[in-house]
Image (cartoon, grey):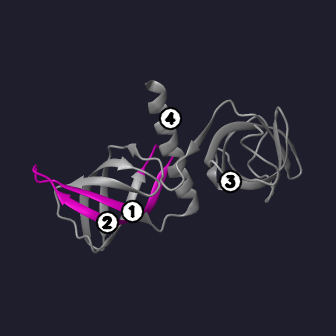
């Protein structure tokens, strides 16, 4: 763990309830894990519950899962993670994601099919020639409990031989909780895919 986390390093902790996300500074690192002092009250953080952890390191963006061993005031003790992963620094994990969505702008709506998804945007396909100058509202259902609402701005439109338009675009007006939800969703799906190989 000493190679991954160092004293005074800033770590983000994300429990099951994303609204209870917190940050903390590493106080000390041992063979069994590390202790950190939280910036905010530890509402929603519980001992022995698995959480996601993120931190920027000299090797890139670090991600791992672990659990809280002890919680005293604003100081928590985190167990050593079994596995960790460095994420790409400048690019969000992109996954294959096939869903039917509706893009809306004022009174106009377009039925589209997603091809891939990341926390930065998505690639879609449509039989409509969608106006690239407009910004569209979109609602993405990741699961029965998770729904993302944001705006979608088209970046590139290509017409294929099949008459369908393939569109790349980015998300705008995405709040931090929704962005973190997308980061986690895409990363976990990507890890599931890699584990099946």
Which residue is the site of mark 4?
A: 191
Which residue is the site of mark 2?
A: 155
Report, in whole angstroms, how far the alpha carbon at label 4 lies from the one at label 2. Answer: 28 Å
Report, in whole angstroms, how far the alpha carbon at label 4 lies from the one at label 1. Answer: 23 Å
Residue 107 coordinates in the image, percent (x, y) = 26, 72
Quadrant (top left, top right, bottom left, bottom right) of the N terminus: top right
Describe the element under mark 1 as helix, strand or loop.
Answer: strand
User: Furthest-right residue in view?
Assistant: 72
Q: Residues within 10 Å of mark 2 (few under 14, many from 20)?
A: few
First in sequence, mark 4 or 2: give its number.
Answer: 2
First in sequence, mark 4 or 3: give its number.
Answer: 3
Describe the element under mark 2 as helix, strand or loop.
Answer: strand
Res 21 label: 3
Residue in view at x 10 percent, y 53 percent? 163
CB under 8 Å between discs 2 and 3: no
CB under 8 Å between discs 4 and 2: no
Q: Residues within 10 Å of mark 4 (few under 14, many from 20)?
A: few
Question: Residue 112 appears in which quarter of the rendering?
Answer: bottom left
Residue 152 falls inside the magenta stretch: yes
Quadrant (top left, top right, bottom left, bottom right) of the C terminus: top left
Residue in view at x 47 percent, y 68 percent? 173
Q: Which is closer to the viewer, label 1 or label 3? A: 1
Report, in whole angstroms, how far the alpha carbon at label 4 lies from the one at label 3. Answer: 22 Å
Above or below for 155 versus 81: below
Above or below for 66 versus 145: above
Which residue is the site of mark 1?
A: 170
Residue 180 coordinates in the image, percent (x, y) = 56, 53
């Amino acid at each position: 763990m000493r190679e991954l986390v160092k004293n005074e390093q800033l770590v983000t902790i994300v429990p099951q309830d994303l609204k209870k996300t917190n940050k903390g500074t590493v106080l000390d690192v041992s063979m069994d894990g590390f202790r950190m002092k939280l910036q905010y009250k530890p509402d929603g953080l519980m001992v022995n519950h698995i959480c996601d952890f993120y931190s920027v390191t000299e090797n890139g963006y670090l991600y791992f899962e672990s659990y809280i061993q002890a919680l005293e005031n604003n100081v928590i003790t985190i167990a050593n993670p079994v596995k960790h992963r460095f994420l790409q620094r400048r690019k969000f994990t992109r996954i294959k994601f096939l869903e039917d969505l509706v893009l809306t702008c004022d009174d106009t709506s377009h039925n589209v099919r997603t091809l891939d998804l990341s926390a930065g945007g998505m690639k879609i396909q449509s039989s409509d020639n969608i106006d690239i100058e407009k910004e569209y509202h979109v609602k993405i259902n990741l699961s029965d409990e998770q729904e993302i609402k944001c705006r979608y701005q088209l970046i590139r439109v290509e017409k294929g031989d099949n008459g369908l338009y393939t569109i790349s675009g980015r998300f705008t007006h995405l709040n931090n909780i929704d962005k973190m939800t997308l980061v986690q969703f895409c990363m976990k799906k990507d890890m599931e895919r890699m584990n099946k190989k």
